[in-house]
Amino acid sequence: MTKEELAAALDGSQYNPGVNMIPNRLDREVKASLLVVAYGASDNLLEFEGAWHDEFDANDECVVMIDTKGPIATEREDSDDDETMLAYLLRKRDAKHYVEALWSPDEPGNYSWIIAATVPAATFEIYEDEEHFCRGIVFSVEDVAKDRA
């Protein structure tokens, strides 16, 4: 499965709080294809599903660095031991790509969320009833491994 095929399969989805965006019937294939879906949820979350599964607080705007292991937390707890903190800092320093979530952006379509990334991505539309809710993205972990152009 390609990122374009998955985006086409998700395009036109209805927002359903608390329910994964990727249908169960596609979950195994999406993970095997190393694809990741990123989308906004509620009014304050950036969600990742597929090869990675994570969520981040995204009040108004959120930028999350990513590498081949997944999204990188914006901050670490002071209670982390030195080895854990060093691994985190090195990972964050070496990350070449990011995903950005914008809440209520000033763009045509009146979206609640628009998700963008520095890695090549295919887009899809999520609706809430008949209104635009989110322009989500699908990208490949393999593309994350490539250097940013």
Image: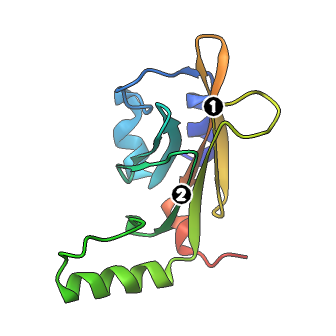
Q: In the rendered view, tell whether residue 123 sits above or below residue 129.
A: below
Residue drawn at x 42%, y 48% is 57
Closest to the observer: 57 or 92? 57
Say which residue label 2 marks.
Answer: 140
* Image quadrant occupied by the C terminus: bottom right
Identify which amino acid the numbered label 1 is placed on.
Answer: Ser
State how far apart marks 2 and 1 are (Cα).
24 Å
Eye-nearest disc, 2 or 1: 1
Q: In the rendered view, tell whether residue 81 sits above or below residue 45.
A: below
Closest to the observer: 134 or 36? 134
Residue drawn at x 38%, y 65% is 73
Closest to the observer: 101 or 13? 101
Its colouring scheme is rainbow
Query: Residue 59 placed where, x, y %?
Result: 51, 45
Say which residue label 1 marks.
Answer: 112
Q: In the rendered view, tell whether residue 38 sits above or below residue 68.
A: above
Answer with mark 2 or mark 1, whichever residue precedes in sequence. Answer: 1
Is 62 positioned to the left or the right of 117 in the image? left
Is 114 positioned to the left or the right of 75 in the image? right
Helix, strand, or loop for circle 2? Answer: strand
Residue drawn at x 41%, y 33% is 26
Residue at the outermost right position: 108
Query: Residue 36 placed where, x, y %?
Result: 48, 50
